[in-house]
Amino acid sequence: MEDFFKKIYKELQGSKKILTAVLTDIESEEISQNLLGEMFLFDEEGFIEFSSEKLENELEKFFLNEDIKNQILAVGEAKNADSQLKEFNLDSNNKLEFFLEPVVNQPHLTVFGAGHIAEPLVKICSLLDFSITVVDDREEFLNFDRFPTADQLLRLPYKDYFTSARIRENDYLVIVTRGHQHDYQVLKEVIDSQASYIGMIGSSRKIKTVYDQLIKDGINEEKLARVHAPIGLDIGSETPAEIAVAIAAEIVAVRRDR
C-alpha cells in the first residue's frame, strides 16, 4: 500500500489528473470479499495502478472493458468533479461499488527566464498555491538565493527542456527570456500545448518579430491569438515588481475563468 501512495504522489508531481477508487461493496461469487477497502487509481490516460497484486489479479480483466473504464474516467473529467459512490456491473455475475475521488492536481507555473521580472513573479505566485519551475541557461541568475520559493530550478538550454517536458492543462507558462530569439524558441515549442495560460513579455515590435518568425514556420494567427502578449493586465505597471503583479493578476483571472 505504501508504494501505491508513492505512485499517487509521483503522478501529482507530474501534474496529472488522477482518480482514486476504494472498493466499498462486492456482489460476486468469484471476487473475494477480502478485497473490500482495497484501492486503485486511474490517470488521465486510463492507466491503472492497483494497491495490491491480489486486487490486480482479480479485477484487471474487467477493466480491459473500455465501457467500464470510460465510466470511471468520466467522474474525474466532469468540470466540477466531486467524490461519489458509484456501482458498476462488471458483467451479469459481478457488481462492485466504489468510492471515487478525483485528486485535484496543483496548478504549475513554469517561468522561462530568470531575470529581474521572474524573481518577484515567483515570490508572488508561490503565495497563490502554484508549484513553480524556473528554466534558464545562466548559472549566475538561476539559484535558490534568488528563488527561495521555487520548487524546481532547471539550468539548461531552453530547447533541451522540451526533450522530456510534457505540458498539461493545469500548466501556466510565462516567457520572460532575455531576447526575442529565446522567446521565439520557447513559444514555438509551447504554442500547440494544452497549457491553460501562455504569456510572453515584450514590446509590440519584439512581439511582432517573434510572431512573424512563427508565421513563416506555418503557425497560424488563430493559435497566436491565445498568447497573452504583451503579458499581464494593464495596470500601468512600470517596475519589475509591478509587472510581476500584473502578470500574476492575469494568471489568476485565467485560472478563475474571469
Image (tube, helix red, strand yellow):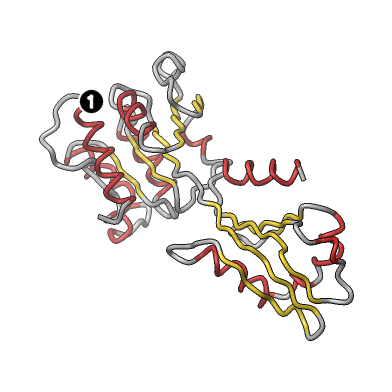
- Residue to which mark 1 is pinned: 241
Check the picture and name the quadrant holding the C terminus. Answer: bottom left
Q: Closest to the observer: 145 or 25?
A: 25
Q: Closest to the observer: 108 or 158?
A: 108
Count of marks overlaid on the render: 1
Q: Closest to the observer: 138 or 107?
A: 107
Q: Assess disc 1: are there few (<14), some (14-19) or many (≥20) residues with their C-alpha within 10 Å of its C-alpha.
A: some
Q: Closest to the observer: 29 or 255?
A: 29
- The answer to whether residue 6 is left or right of residue 243 is right
- The answer to whether residue 206 is left or right of residue 120 is left
* 204 shown above or below 222: above
Picture coordinates of residue 137, whole percent (x, y): 46, 24
Picture coordinates of residue 228, whole percent (x, y): 26, 47
* 139 shown above or below 66: above
**Name of the residue lying farthest toward the left:** 236
Residue for point 53% across, 46% down: 15
* 233 shown above or below 111: below
Residue for point 82% across, 83% down: 93
State which quadrant residue 75 falls in: bottom right
Residue for point 50% across, 62% down: 82
Picture coordinates of residue 251, whole percent (x, y): 30, 44
- The answer to whether residue 11 is left or right of residue 246 is right
- The answer to whether residue 165 is left or right of residue 209 is right
* 38 shown above or below 135: below
